[in-house]
Amino acid sequence: MAIGLEHWLILAAVLFSIGLYGVLAKRNAVVILMSIEIMLSAVNITMVAFSRYGQYITGQVFVIFIMVVAAAEVAIGLALIISIYRRRKTVDAEKYDTMKW
Amino acid sequence: MGLQIAFWILAVVSVGAAVAVVLLHNVFRAALFLVLCFFTVAGLYVAMGADFLAGAQVLIYVGAIAVLIIFGIMLTRDSTEGSPSGRLRLPALLIGFLFLVTMIFVVIGTDWGAVAEVSAEPTTEALAEAIFGGDGGFVLAFEIAAALLLAAIIGAIVLVRDK
């Protein structure tokens, strides 16, 4: 059975679901960030797959921009986590309740 | 044939590494499995003929983001806590599973109009042409991305520096 577009899309969906579970279920803020990175990688795989099997290069251009935004996001996210850790001495996302209404 | 073998090996390893990231109790080991997951995603890009993106993936994700995350783990060491699951574990499992089933139904049920045989050519020149070439391309988005990175660097420094 030849590898077609569907294989790549389903693989990306599996990776995205794993990342989604991690984001929703985990309490460690750093692990939540790591799960977000897995979800972004899954989306990138989808983009490249469409770019390849649709013969448009634009999908790969979008992947470059997603990588840039992911780098900025993880830098800011970790800075926030470290900043909160210094004040509260915890990385447990369920204890970050200062802005909870 | 080679593509099939490569796909299945990379798919199994990447999914296994991603599962390890969300299931392992030790945060540092989870980060190492995240690095493995990034590497296999780079391999998947190679299998799809996206050579430039594979290089960028290794440089940015494996080189920069993974190191950044490991630094973050080292600086917020919670040795007793590890990486436990919250109260929403079962709902999260259910939501992830439902999302996966929905996506698989959509992917299988849709006619994507995909090209069957694709040629594998170097993509670097085509990417440069698409971003900077001819009728505008993505030059504005490129400049905004540069400004975004600068803002992120300054923001990260301001957030974590000692007062």
Image (spheres, helix red, strand yellow):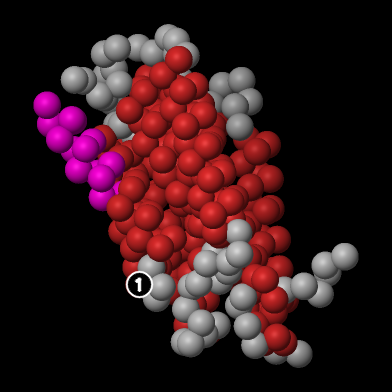
Q: Position of residue B4 (x, y in %)?
A: 18, 30
Q: Is residue A75 visible?
A: no
Q: Residue A76 versus residue B110: which sits nearer the camera?
A: B110
Q: Position of residue B78 (x, y in %)?
A: 52, 85
Give the quarter of the figure containing the N terminus of chain A: top left
| Residue type marked 1 | Arg
For the point 45% across and 15% down, which residue is it?
A: B109
Name the side, left or right, on which A13 lies relative to B151. Answer: left
Give the quarter of the figure containing the C terminus of chain A: bottom right
Under circle 1, the secondary element is helix
Q: Is residue A82 visible?
A: yes
Q: Position of residue B47 (x, y in %)?
A: 26, 35
**Residue situated furthest left in the rendering:** B1
Q: Which residues are magenta?
A: B1-14
Q: Is residue B4 magenta?
A: yes
For the point 29% across and 17% down, which residue is it?
A: B118
Q: Residue B24 versus residue B129: which sits nearer the camera?
A: B24
Name the side, left or right, on which A62 lies relative to B146. Answer: left
Q: What residue is shown with label 1?
A: B29
**Residue situated furthest right in the rendering:** A101
Secondary structure, magenta segment, majority class: helix
For the point 39% across and 31% down, which residue is it?
A: A10
Q: Is residue A32 above or below residue B121?
A: below
Name the side, left or right, on which A16 lies relative to B156. Answer: left
